[in-house]
Structures are given as C-alpha cells and as structure tokens.
Image (spheres, rainbow, N blue to C red):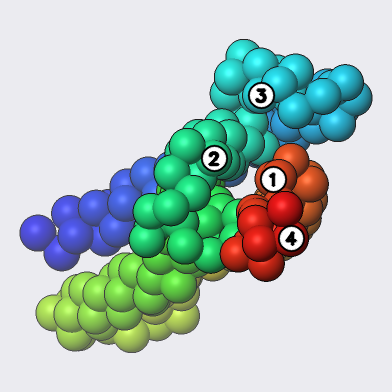
Amino acid sequence: MDTLIVNFVFFLLILVSIITWTIAFMKYKQMKQVALISEEFNKRFWDAKNWKDGEKIASESQSDLALIAQEGFSVFNEYSKNTGALKYAGDIRDALEPPLYQETQKILRRHERGLAELASIGSTAPFIGLFGTVWGIMNAMKTIGESGQATIDMVAGPVGEALIATAIGIAAALPAVIFYNYFVRKMKIWTTELDTFNESFIRLASRQVKPKKTAGDENAK
C-alpha cells in the first residue's frame, strides 16, 4: 500500500507535467494565430477607404479586433437610428465605451483559459512531490525498523528513491511557472493592443456622427 501511494504520486506528477506542456503548446499556437489574423485585419481595416468599407471588412473577419469592431458598428448603427432614446442620451463615446469594454473583457477571458491550470500546477506540484518524499521516507524508516538494521546501504537506497519525488515535483512545477509568466506577459501586451484599438475606433466613430441641431440653430433659421 505504501509503495502504491508513492507510485501514484509519481504518476500524478508525470500527468501534470504532460498537461503543462500540452497547455503551453496549445496557447502558444493560439496566440500566434491570433496575432497573425489580427495584424492582417488591422492593416485591411485602417486601409479602408470609408466607414462603410470598414464595416464590411470587420464583418468578414473573426479576429479579436474584428469582433470589437463588429460590436462597435452595431452600437453605432443603433445610436444613429435612436438619437432621441435615453439609452443614447450622451455622445457616441458614452454609447460605445461600455459595450466595447465588455467585448474586450470577453475576449481576454477566452484567452485566459489554461492560465489558472498552469498557476495551480506551478504552486502545487512541489508539495505533491514533497508529500511523496515524506511518505517514501516514512515507508523506508518503517522497513528499516522492522529489519532491525540501519546500515548506510539500507538507508541510502530507499531514502534516495523517495527524494526523487521532490525532484520530479520541482521539474513539473518549473515549466508551469515559466509558461504562466510568459503568457501573462503576452496577455498584458495584448490587452494594451485591444485598448488602443478601442480608443482609435471610438475616435473614428466620433468623426462619423453628424452634429445635433440645437434650439438656437432652429431659431436662427
């Protein structure tokens, strides 16, 4: 039973190590693809000749920036049709900022999947390995006590084998921590990119809004 528990610890650490590398590979591939299609969309969008062409380009893409633009165009069209509604009582910036912020957070939450798992593995794997080590040493001491002999050969073998669990735990945790920090840094950079696009889109939308006529303008006529 004691050996079975130590072997289970070894199996668990190997399993979390495989999970770590799988998550890292998938997220690296995902982020690389996101960056490529977003860069392509960004160029096409800002090279558009007018507002309508920009809307058409946004509708044809599924990049993160395109999703934000699609939400922005949808809100802008509603704002233009319902200028008298209380929902759109402010200027276009007031109408666009909340939905664009919500869309950005939705995108970021999707990209954050897997980071919690990496953080958990990085923080718990050493303790799992330490548990295996402590359990293995207890088992070794029990065997030595039952034999009535405590020579170096009898102690070094079982204890050394038990210490391997700690080494495997650290080996499983280290890549998880490195990958977690790497992807968090990438996420911060991507968040800045999304915020920059949001602000640029809002400024562009503001230029498309026709000035509202005031009571003074009507009286002047």
Find the distance from the CA under tag 3 to the CA under tag 1.
15 Å
Q: Earlier in the sequence, mark 4 or mark 2?
A: 2
Q: Given this view, does label 1 or label 4 mark the residue nearer the observer? A: 4
Residue type, mark 4 in image? Ala
Find the distance from the CA under tag 2 to the CA under tag 3.
15 Å
**Residue situated in front as seen by the camera: 202 or 177:** 202
Q: Are marks 1 and 2 in contact (CB under 8 Å)?
A: yes
Residue type, mark 3 in image? Glu
Assign a secondary structure to mark 2.
helix
Assign a secondary structure to mark 3.
helix
Q: Earlier in the sequence, mark 1 or mark 2?
A: 2
Above or below: residue 5 compared with residue 52: below
Residue type, mark 2 in image? Ser
Residue beneath label 2, please?
80
Residue beneath label 3, please?
55
Q: Residues within 10 Å of mark 4 (few under 14, many from 20)?
A: few
**Residue situated in front as seen by the camera: 173 or 104:** 104
The residue shown at (74%, 60%) is 220
Q: Residues within 10 Å of mark 1 (few under 14, many from 20)?
A: few
Q: Given this view, does label 3 or label 1 mark the residue nearer the observer? A: 1
Q: Earlier in the sequence, mark 1 or mark 4?
A: 1
Residue type, mark 1 in image? Val
Q: Residues within 10 Å of mark 3 (few under 14, many from 20)?
A: some
Find the distance from the CA under tag 1 to the CA under tag 4.
22 Å
The residue shown at (49%, 49%) is 83
Residue beneath label 4, please?
220
Above or below: residue 191 compared with residue 216: above
Image location of residue 143, percent across then percent down: 20, 74
Residue beneath label 1, please?
209
